[in-house]
Amino acid sequence: MTSPFADLLAANRSYTEGFALGDLTGLAAKGLGVLTCIDSRIEPLSMLGLQPGDAKIVRNAGAQLTDDALRSLVVAAQRLSVRRIMVVAHTDCAMSPTEAAVRADVERLRSSAEMPAGTIVAGFFYDVKTGLLHPIDD
Ligand SMILES: [Zn+2]
């Protein structure tokens, strides 16, 4: 019986043939953390002009700042060179996030006692029809 993951393992073997990321460190080269949704229409690196190694990406349904997402972003800021964080919700999301919810998550990140002083946090909405990011004013 063929593994339901056989196609993916075959693709991975092909991936290793040109693998060039082995010298990356675990630090975020661009000092960026991104919290965004699991939606398959979102390509966090591409939409921001980034490469592997540039940013720490945290994803969950609705780009919500859950306790675990907060923990991951705090670790990224404390230990992995993250100095600025984008909270990126999107249009046509199954979780129907609001700008108010994104603002509240941005504020929670900014006011977290564990977040290193000086960490910059901002909220955005990503338009899945155009690919454009819209800043959410606070
Ligand atoms: Zn979504």
Image (tube, helix red, strand yellow):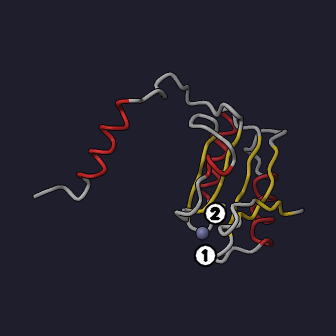
In the picture, measured across the screen, residue 76 lies left or right of residue 7, that is: right
Compare residues 67 and 61 and report the one nearer the observer.
Answer: 61
Residue 113's spot in the image, x, y percent?
A: 77, 47
When asked about the image quadrant of residue 29, the answer is: top right
Residue placed furthest toward the left: 1
Asked if the residue under mark 1 is in contact with the one under mark 2, i.e. CB atoms within 8 Å, the reply is yes
Residue placed furthest toward the top: 23
At x 58%, y 77%, the residue is 94
Question: What number is the disc on residue 75?
Answer: none
In the picture, measured across the screen, residue 116 lies left or right of residue 6, that is: right
Count of number-bearing discs: 2
Secondary structure of the residue carrying numbered label 2: loop
Distance from mark 1 CB to nearest ligand 1 atom below 8 Å:
yes
Residue with the mark numbered 2? 63
Q: Is residue 13 above or below residue 95?
A: above
At x 61%, y 58%, the residue is 67
Distance from disc 2 to disc 1, alpha carbons, whole Å, reads 9 Å
Distance from mark 2 CB to nearest ligand 1 atom below 8 Å:
yes
At x 70%, y 34%, the residue is 30
Q: Amino acid at mark 1?
A: Met
For label 2, the crowd category at 10 Å Cα-Cα, with few meaning under 14, some 14 to 19 and many 20 or more, is many
Q: Quadrant of the N terminus?
A: bottom left
Residue with the mark numbered 1? 95
Residue 119's spot in the image, x, y percent?
A: 80, 41
Which sits earlier in the primary sequence, circle 2 or circle 1? 2
When asked about the image quadrant of residue 101, the answer is: bottom right
Q: Amino acid at mark 2?
A: Ala
Compare residues 45 and 80 and report the one nearer the observer.
Answer: 45
Can you tell me which quadrant of the image ligand 1 is in? bottom right
Residue 3's spot in the image, x, y percent?
A: 19, 55
Secondary structure of the residue carrying numbered label 1: loop
